[in-house]
Amino acid sequence: MGALPLHEQSNPFVAALVELVTLQQGRTGFVTLPEFTEVLDRHFPT
């Protein structure tokens, strides 16, 4: 089995980053640690 194409390898990272940026919009502070953890858990389940 060969390696995944680069765009498929990066999809979870891009999706998580987009979600985090969306959460951050309009805030004066940072995304909270629990929110950050939820986003990562959704995109990188164990």
Image: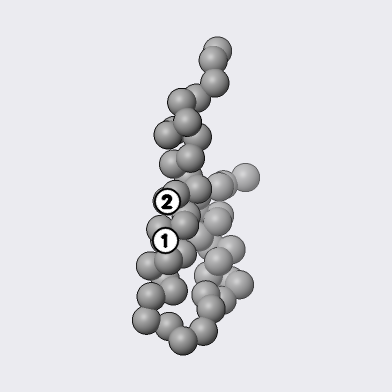
From this viewpoint, which residue is outermost toward the top? 1
Task: Report if the CB atoms under discs 2 and 1 are less than 8 Å apart.
Answer: yes
* Residue closer to the observer: 19 or 45: 19
Q: Quadrant of the C terminus?
A: top right
Q: Position of residue 45 (x, y in %)?
A: 57, 47
Question: Which residue position holds label 1?
Answer: 19
Q: Residue at x 44, y 49 (%)?
A: 14
Q: Colour scheme of this structure image? A: one colour
Q: Secondary structure at mark 2?
A: helix
For the image shown, how many numbered marks are present on the structure? 2
Q: Amino acid at mark 1?
A: Glu
Question: Which residue position holds label 2?
Answer: 15
Separation of marks 2 and 1 at Cα, in angstroms: 6 Å
Q: Quadrant of the N terminus?
A: top right
Q: Secondary structure at mark 1?
A: helix
Q: Residue at x 56, y 54 (%)?
A: 41
